[in-house]
Amino acid sequence: MDEKRTFTPEQLRYLRLLSKRFPTVQAAGTEIIRLRAILNLPKPTEHFMSDIHGEHEAFLHILGSGSGEVKEKILELFGNTLSQRDCSDLATLIYYPRAKLELEAEETGNLTEWYRLTIHRLVNLCRYVSTKHTRRKVRSYMDPEYESILDELIHLAGEGGFRQDQYENIISTIIQIGQAAPVIQALSQLIKALVVDRLHIVGDIFDRGPRADIVMDSLMQTNNVDIQWGNHDVLWMGAASGSRTLVATVLSNSIRYNNLDVIETGYGISLRPLSIFANEIYSGSDTRQFQVKLTGDDAKQYTEKDKLLSARMYKAITIILFKLEGQKLLRHPEFGMADRLLLDKIDRENRTVSINGQAYPLLDWDFPTVDPADPYALTEEESHVIEQLTDSFRNSEKLQQHIRFLYSRGSLYKICNGNLLFHGCIPMTEDGQLKTFTIGGKERSGKRFLDYAEKTARKAYYDRRGSAERQFGMDFLWWLWAGRDSPIFGRSRMTTFERRFLADETTWAEPKNAYYRYCQDPKVCDMLLKEFGLEGDHCHIINGHVPVRTKSGESPIKGGGKLLVIDGGFCRAYQPTTGIAGYTLIYNSRHYRIVSHQPFTGKWNAIHKNDDIQNESLVFEQLPSRMRICQTDEGVALQAQVDDLMMLLDAYRTGAVTEDHRH
């Protein structure tokens, strides 16, 4: 006879709390059955993207198309019954339901019949892409206003007899009462959510491209998304936290690349204080080294007066930036970046600057606000301007919403289903060891340092304003952005000063951390994975940050298949280097697949001409058998819940915990 099970006081306390949710044997048993059914389902599909850099139109199209997965599912289901044109029309409708519905309303004669056919097709596609999900999960992805209608349609579709009549009657009623368009939009959104079950953004949402704010809006509406912070994300996190240095950096970068829409339109931040200051102080200054990059239509639209103002603003904020960076470096000798203190190395008489003991001629020696006796001190006017601008970043409600989302859904690295995700690198020494940092008063390397770095980065936003902890957190965010061998910068120095003031391009070099050499070795990749607790044939490191030169034959698959670099050039500025316009890594229940994207021709062409992004897909790693949820991280958590509920059943059956049948 089995011994009666005994429970520790801690177990009993936990089980009594659990019994509040599952008050009877039947309730606990039903939940066990549900969870075990989920554990046996195929692993949901994960999508990985990186280095979006504000390219909102291309990103939204790729996200809406599931990196080509939506079109693939349409062709699998309807390829033998619909024409290529009809399949493309259906795909575009799913990507852009509102715009496509408006276009059909203008162009289609018999809209009632079009609505009927379209709803039929979308419902069947919903059924097809929902086979890997429980009914409860499918419902959780539905628009709450149409949940009951969509659930009924998907459940009835394909049934015969009177059930088919019921199905047709629901569709007829939807059309008759004028609800066809919103139902079609709800079905389209559901399909997209089911195709991309989990989205990982491996860093760099911000900068370069026009509207990072629109990308952030879409991510906040996406189910099941996580973000690994990139250096450009950390830059904006610091600016929103109130770091004057990082506000100056954001503005310097944005003005240089004429990328001000996101600041002025997206976040409602006025640059008027800077423009007034720049026009007053730099009116007679040499700004030839601070010409703003203008391309295409921008170059034609800007007058010479506009260009001159932009150059003055760029120079004004850059000098403020150099001063603030210098103050930070003097405040933190532990950053080990004294060689970046250059304003005090300027010889005005000889018009040179000394770098590592060597004098280099300056292209521009006109510094009206730099005091040779105290070069890193802001003037009263500079201090007033940067305070005004910093307040604007702190008081932009939309920016603060986006940064809170970055903090809540983001981290420096993530371990998920056997993969280690981080944006830049795990810093290493020249002899191939993990690099040790003493920032924070203790020696740390590898995982320990990244854990410390993330904790410190959070202090910049969440600690009390004005506290020493918050100030150090903001300084540390700047170090993450530009610090020597920072894990998300991954270089020995940022040579902004040299690029603006020196003709000798050998001084512009920004040597990469040794990680980028050693990670080509599968044994090093295994060592790094083990540092984060991962071992096995199907474990990988997934990075962004360094664009892959696809057109030169470089592969995103490195380190003997252990390392996947998925920066393919979403940003238009990098596309001449990469030869493509981004990668998506897809990890489903059967394989790993990498999809390379060609440049996007624009939303108008997509809607009016069904122009889709051309993709090339490569399956590079096949799993030995179809992966089930029970083999994933989610499965481990679900199995733990099953184990707890089994213990609760034992407690009920032995009388250690009493059932409550009142519920």
Image: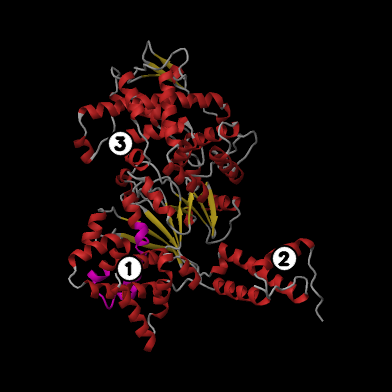
Considering only order in the chain, which callout, 2 or 1, is on the residue closer to the N terminus?
Answer: 2
Q: How far apart are marks 3 and 1 (CA)?
A: 39 Å
Q: Tell us which disc is closer to us: 3 or 1.
A: 1
Residue type for callout 2: Arg
Question: What segment carries the magenta color?
Answer: 62-87
Q: Where is residue 324 in the image (x, y as percent from the top left)?
A: 47, 26
Please give the residue where the numbered disc 2 appears in the rendered image: 16
- Residue 378 in the magenta stretch? The answer is no
Q: Residue drawn at (35%, 70%), measured in percent from left and top?
A: 73
Task: Tell me the crowding category of disc 2: few under 14, some 14 to 19, or many 20 or more residues within 10 angstroms, Cα based.
Answer: some
Q: Can residue 556 be seen in this view?
A: no
Task: Tell me the crowding category of disc 1: few under 14, some 14 to 19, or many 20 or more residues within 10 angstroms, Cα based.
Answer: many
Q: Position of residue 11 (x, y in %)?
A: 75, 63
Q: Where is residue 366 in the image (x, y as percent from the top left)?
A: 34, 17
Residue type for callout 1: Ile
Q: Tell us which disc is closer to us: 3 or 2.
A: 2
Q: Residue drawn at (36%, 75%), measured in percent from left and top?
A: 124
Q: Where is residue 623 in the image (x, y as percent from the top left)?
A: 49, 67
Numbered label attached to residue 184: 1
Q: Main secondary structure of the magenta part?
A: helix
Image height check: is 248 above or below 556? Answer: above
In which quadrant of the rendered view does residue 334 lie?
top right
Considering only order in the chain, which callout, 1 or 3, is on the residue closer to the N terminus?
Answer: 1
Circles 1, 2 touching at the beta carbon (< 8 Å): no
Please give the residue where the numbered disc 3 appears in the rendered image: 258
Image height check: is 3 above or below 45? Answer: below
Quadrant that contains the N terminus: bottom right
Residue type for callout 3: Asn
